[in-house]
């Protein structure tokens, strides 16, 4: 097979009972894509065929909807061909399944970061009315570093849809008590399932096990999991409470929201219990939460904040560090995340900036000007976000629009302040 529709087929990536996945190329965007193809005969195979058809339609219906940096994006879907196929983002790093054995575990801080990113992606999906229902390591792809992308929304429940949902679909070991008992589901079912994934990535074991599906279901609905630190004593104690809260059987004891779960993950990452494990790095969970708290980014969506995080560089500051020099060429601007900096010109203090303030933005707004107009120096320890003007030019239109809106607001505020000073001086 050389083509599927307009897509060039490069090679086969894998094959399952109902679908074959190919690496392809989109001739219009010149990007590599993954193509999941399903033969028409699969859909006509009795009751199993009906289920396969529903799963295909559910996943295909999400094309263009779940656009998030930590969800595999579906670009296109063709349901009336043989084979039918779904075209999606290609992620080369494989799944997290290979890191679920005791002798192949990822560093603990990396696991916390990955689960944090999953929690934010699933919160995004939940806000659009989508519950995944089949979370497991095999459905979480590793992109680069701690970046992950959730895939396979075929079993998803769309809350606002009248479409009949497929029951009995999913992987029993990762199902919530509500799911195995076929109760009505909400996002807390996904929280439970992600908790099982978290437990397995930390320990190399599943929290609930049985010799068959009946005993497994009994353990999920009645058994108490062994705390992770009993499986792996070197784990920080702060992770025990988080994992066990995700695995609470009763909804009123489980995390009520994705925000609450994400908050505890970020707090655990920065805690002293994990200080030695994470070394001196600034985690993506910290970066994300810092960006959300800064006034500069108050109107940015979560998706836009993730984009800013990925296109920016972060630098620790110490007293006396020179960030910009008068007369030097400007090819970036900065947003102060922590600490204070002073703006001086010929040793005369012009201003003091604090967290949430930006400086050097004329490199983006007026690149023809070229040279910096003043010195910028750190007044103590801090953290600064550095954004290249060339990199921002490659960002999405929505993200560039938000930057433009903020810069316009800043320019108006500065003009208003200048007018007030002139009025005051005249009086």
Image (cartoon, helix red, strand yellow):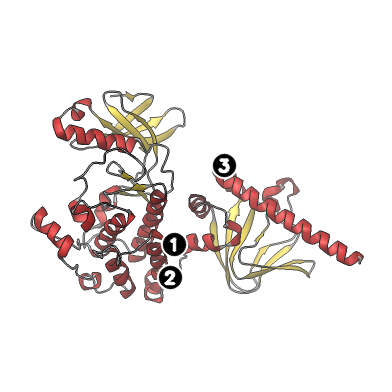
Local SS, label 2: helix
Earlier along the polypeptide chain: callout 1 or callout 3?
1
Local SS, label 3: helix
Q: Are marks 2 and 1 in contact (CB under 8 Å)?
A: yes
> How far apart are the alpha carbons under marks 2 and 1?
9 Å
> How far apart are the alpha carbons under marks 2 and 3?
33 Å
* Residue that carries the numbered disc 3 in the rendered image: 397
**Image position, residue 152 (x, y; %):** 30, 43
Name which quarter of the figure residue 243 lies in.
bottom left
Decide: is 96 above or below 33: below
How dense is the environment of label 1, judged by Cα within 10 Å: few (below 14), some, or many (20 and up)?
A: many
Q: Measuring 9% from the left and 58% from the top, which residue is drawn there?
A: 215
Q: Measuring 61% from the left and 50% from the top, which residue is drawn there?
A: 403
* Residue that carries the numbered disc 2 in the rendered image: 270
Left or right: 49 in relation to 403: left
- Which mark is on residue 285? 1
Q: Measuring 50% from the left and 55% from the top, which residue is drawn there?
A: 309
> How far apart are the alpha carbons under marks 1 and 3?
24 Å
Q: Are marks 2 and 3 in contact (CB under 8 Å)?
A: no
Name which quarter of the figure residue 247 lies in.
bottom left
Decide: is 329 above or below 60: below
């Amino acid at each position: 097979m050389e083509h599927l529709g307009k897509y060039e087929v490069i090679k086969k990536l894998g094959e399952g009972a109902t679908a074959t996945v190919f690496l392809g190329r989109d001739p219009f965007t010149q990007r590599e894509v993954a193509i999941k193809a399903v033969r028409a005969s699969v859909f006509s195979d009795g009751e199993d065929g009906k289920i396969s058809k529903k799963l295909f339609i559910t996943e295909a219906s999400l094309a263009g909807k779940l656009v998030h940096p930590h969800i595999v994006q579906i670009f296109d879907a063709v349901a009336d061909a043989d084979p039918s196929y779904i075209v999606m983002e290609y992620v080369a790093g494989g799944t997290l399944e290979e890191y679920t054995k005791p002798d192949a575990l990822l560093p603990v801080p990396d696991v916390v970061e990955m689960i944090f990113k999953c929690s934010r992606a699933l919160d995004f999906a939940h806000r659009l009315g989508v519950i995944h229902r089949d979370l497991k390591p095999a459905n979480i792809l590793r992109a680069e570093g701690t970046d992950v992308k959730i895939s396979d929304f075929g079993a998803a429940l769309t809350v606002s849809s009248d479409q009949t949902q497929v029951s009995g679909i999913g992987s029993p070991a990762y199902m919530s008590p509500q799911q195995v008992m076929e109760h009505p589901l909400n996002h807390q079912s996904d929280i439970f399932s992600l908790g099982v994934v978290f437990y397995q990535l930390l320990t190399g074991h599943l929290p609930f096990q049985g010799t068959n599906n009946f005993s497994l279901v009994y353990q999920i609905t009645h058994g108490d999991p062994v705390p992770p630190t009993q499986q792996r004593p070197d784990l920080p104690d702060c992770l025990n409470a988080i994992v066990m809260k995700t695995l609470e059987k009763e909804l009123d004891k489980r995390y009520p929201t994705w925000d609450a779960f994400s908050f505890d993950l970020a707090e655990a990452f920065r805690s002293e219990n994990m200080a030695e494990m994470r070394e001196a790095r600034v985690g993506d969970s910290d970066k994300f939460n810092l960006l959300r708290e800064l006034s500069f980014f108050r109107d940015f969506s979560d998706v836009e904040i993730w984009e800013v995080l990925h296109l920016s560089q972060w630098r620790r500051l110490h007293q006396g560090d020179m960030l910009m020099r008068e007369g030097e060429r400007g090819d970036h601007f900065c947003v102060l995340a922590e600490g204070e900096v002073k703006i001086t010109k010929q040793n005369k203090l012009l201003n003091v900036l604090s967290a949430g303030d930006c400086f050097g933005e004329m490199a983006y707004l007026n690149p023809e000007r070229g040279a910096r107009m003043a010195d910028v120096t750190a007044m103590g320890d801090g953290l600064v976000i550095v954004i290249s003007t060339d990199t921002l030019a490659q960002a999405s239109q929505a993200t560039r629009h938000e930057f433009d809106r903020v810069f316009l607001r800043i320019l108006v505020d500065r003009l208003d302040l200048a007018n007030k000073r002139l009025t005051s001086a005249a009086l």
